Every structure is written in structure tokens, then in C-alpha cells.
Amino acid sequence: MDLKNVVIVLDHPEESRNIGAACRAMANNDISELRIVGNKADYDIEHIHVLAIHAKDIFDRAKFYSSIKEATADCFMCAGTTRRSGKKRGKLLLPEEFARKISGVDAKVAVVFGNERTGLTDEQLDECNLGVTIPSSNSFGSLNLSHAVQILCYHIFREFLREQNKGTRGVTPITLERLDSTVKTISNNLEEVGFFKMPGREDMENYWRSILSRAALTEGEAKYLEKTFNKISGLAKKNNK
């Protein structure tokens, strides 16, 4: 794991000072890449710098995007943070479980934090590959944005130190953008053999994207999968003649 590969994504944060505090939390754990879904003009840079203190350069280098999917296209995994369980949210990992999951991987990984007031919606979580939750009080469960960032970054940093002590070598999985090409190949071939009807394609693609992103496929593995499904489709066509 390389901490330079850890990307913190804030989706439409409301309070400028929370962004600054999040930058400071990142710097405490040697994590420096910040991406924001939203418009830079909506935020008070002076307020951000005051709370960031010596970590203001993290915000100054931050990039802005129009969606979570766009902000995480070059990552191999996108983890959405949430405190609410639900049918569409799937199994939620604890911060330490997530940190172990990305251990030994030499590729960018994104951790996404929602708006302070609403958190991540089901639609926004659909743009992520898995969910991470921070246990908190049932009577007062909502965490400050920067506190949540601090907890996730801390566990990732601790895992990084453990990995360094063990001398673990990393693997390089494909990005989510590259993975989408593999998912499209699988879906095209399944559609050609009549596995599903067109209305079910989106759900099928979301399923494959979720499963395969967690598998951290290498380029060679992705190509092998594509070759396998292309061959399945070809054999089906040949047998139906």
C-alpha cells in the first residue's frame, strides 16, 4: 500500500470549515489527495485555510468533479461511508476491515464521504463498490465530517505501518474505468446468449461491477474473463446454427 494512492472524496460538503478540518485529519495520517464532488465557487477558501492550518495545501491541490463515478474512475475501489444499513447498502465493513482489504494493493482507492446533513443517499452509494461504517451511539450516531475522515484515515495509516513492518509487496489491480469495459463485455455476451432481457442489464452490470471491483482484478485477469465470456457467446451461437 502507498498512502499516495489513497483518495478522500467529499460529496457536496456544506460547511467550508469542515473541509479544512478534513484536510488536517488527512495530513495527520500522511494522506494528501482530496477530491470534491461539487463546485469550488461554493466554498469560502479563507474559512477552509483557517481550519486546515498547515494542511491548506491539500485543499489548494484538490480537484472538483460532477459525480462520484467521475471522481473515482482511476481508482480500483470506491468505498462509500454510511451509518445506515439497508437493502441497497449491502454488508458494511468496519474501518479496520476496510483497511485490511486494501492492504498490499498498489493502486488508487477512494473513500467517499457524504454531505454532513444527509450522508450518502442510496443512489450515491450505488456509485460505490462497497460500504464502510463507523460504529457510534444509537442515540447520537451522527459524526462530524472531519471526525469520520480522521477515523478512516487513521485505520488506513495503521494498516500501512503494519504492512511496512512486514515488508508486504503490492499487486496492481485495474481501475474502475477499465473494469467497466470488462463488465460491458460480460453483459454484451450474456445478452447475446439470452441470459437476461434488456431491462435487467443495468442491475446485472452493477452486480458484476460490485463483485469484480472487490476482487481487485489485474489486467491479465480482466482479459482472461473477457476472453472466457467471448468464447461462451461464440460457442452458443455455433451450437444454435
Image (cartoon, rainbow, N blue to C red):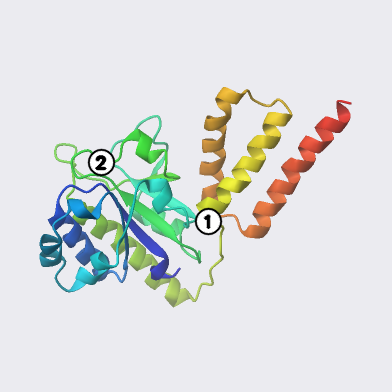
- Whether residue 101 sits left or right of residue 117 in the image: it is right
Marks 2 and 1 in Cβ contact (< 8 Å): no
Q: Amino acid at mark 1?
A: Thr
Q: In which quadrant will I find the C terminus?
A: top right
Residue at 49% x, 63% y is 107
- Whether residue 194 sits left or right of residue 75 in the image: it is right
Q: Provide the secondary structure element on which disc 2 rests.
A: loop
Q: Quadrant of residue 238?
A: top right
Residue at 29% x, 36% y is 84
Q: Amino acid at mark 2?
A: Gly
Q: Residues within 10 Å of mark 2 (few under 14, many from 20)?
A: many
Q: In which quadrant will I find the N terminus?
A: bottom left
**Where residue 59 sits: x, y (%)?**
24, 64
Number of on-image labels: 2
- Please say whether residue 159 is visible from this viewpoint: yes
200 above or below 12? above
Q: Which residue is mark 1?
A: 175
Between the C-alphas of marks 2 and 1, the distance is 25 Å
Q: Nearer the viewer, mark 2 or mark 1?
A: 1
Q: Provide the secondary structure element on which disc 1 rests.
A: loop
- Please say whether residue 93 is visible from this viewpoint: no
